[in-house]
Amino acid sequence: MGGPQLYSAERGHPRLRQRHVGFAIGEAERDAWLHCMRGALEATIDDAAARQEILVSMQKLADWMRNQAGNPHDSAAKSQLIPLQTN
């Protein structure tokens, strides 16, 4: 999300998608995770602009993590991008 690379410097690349390959992550799982993250942001960050900025980054990450058919980041689905909700 643009901060210092402290985790990577100490432990290497996090390889999030590789670590989650054993779990089916589709639209429903993405949306459920984003719902939880949205609640956590609302509970912990008072600044609405900061919350929104973090949420936008989380939405991109959550969509990229999808590993089921229809992932807009898979080369076969590049023309079928799905808009993210920001509410």
Image (cartoon, rainbow, N blue to C red):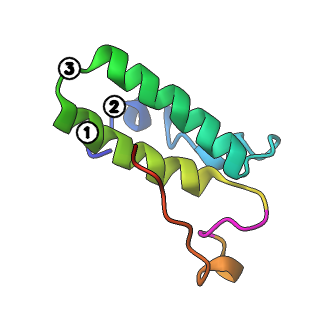
Q: Residues within 10 Å of mark 2 (few under 14, many from 20)?
A: few
x and y percentages locating residue 57 in the rendered image: 37, 47
Q: Residue at x 80, y 45 (%)?
A: 24
Which callout, 3 or 2, points at the residue further toward the start of the chain?
Answer: 2
Q: Nearer the viewer, residue 76 or 2?
A: 76
3D distance between C-alphas at marks 2 and 1 = 8 Å
3D distance between C-alphas at marks 3 and 2 = 25 Å
Residue holding disc 2: 6
- Look at the numbered disc 1 and give the secondary structure of its residue: loop
- Look at the numbered disc 2 and give the secondary structure of its residue: helix
Q: Residue at x 73, y 47 (%)?
A: 25
Quarter of the view holding residue 40: top left
Residue holding disc 1: 3
Q: Quadrant of the N terminus?
A: top left
What secondary structure predominates along the stretch shown in magenta?
A: loop
Q: Is residue 55 magenta?
A: no
Query: Mark 1 or mark 3: which is in front?
Result: 3
